[in-house]
Amino acid sequence: MNVRSSSSWVLLALLFAFNSVLLSSRALPAQEDAAGSRKVAAKVSPQYPALARALKISGIVKVEALVAPNGTVKSLEVKGGHPVLAEAAENALRQWKWEPASHETHESVELRFNP
């Protein structure tokens, strides 16, 4: 093996190590968010909208909730689902209560609607 090919291998190994460190440091916040999931203390089931029932609309509504330290919902953002079902999901989630924590958390919730 000559000097030129061995230095190429060293450079390649260094680039691989550098990329590994970069990727692992970016993955840490997502792991922290997943570990910070709080348990729901009280749930309210969503009311199935009359329009959705008449049109036989079913599906899943995905919502991101910002939960205050005391467990109440501060804000909601619908991430996916049929608009007719989304309002019912938001109305129910505003009444949910999570266990207390030392700080605000973002909680992902999926609500299923079946007629």
Image (cartoon, grey):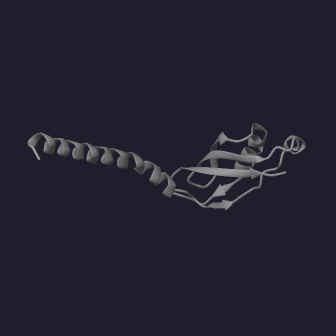
Return the residue found at the far left. 3
Quadrant of res 64: top right
Residue ranking furthest to the front: 1
Side of 89 where 36 appears, left or right: left
Q: Nearer the viewer, residue 3 or 46?
A: 3
From the viewer's perspective, tell me whether residue 23 is left or right of residue 99.
left
**Label tally:** 0
The percent coordinates of residue 43 (x first, y second) are 71, 58
Q: Residue furthest top?
A: 83
**Residue name at image x 20 percent, y 42 percent:** 11
Q: Nearer the viewer, residue 90 or 17?
A: 17
Q: Nearer the viewer, residue 115 or 9?
A: 9
* Place of residue 5 in the rendered image (x, y in percent of width and height, measured from the top left): 15, 42
Q: x and y percent of residue 14 in the render?
A: 22, 45
Residue found at x 31% / y 44%: 19
Looking at the rendering, which quadrant does residue 84 occupy?
A: top right
Name the one closer to the observer, 5 or 86.
Answer: 5
Residue furthest out toward the right: 54
Residue located 41% across and 48% down the image = 27
Compared across the picture, whether 73 is left or right of 24 comes to right
Q: Measuring 82% from the left and 43% from the top, which residue is drawn there?
A: 57
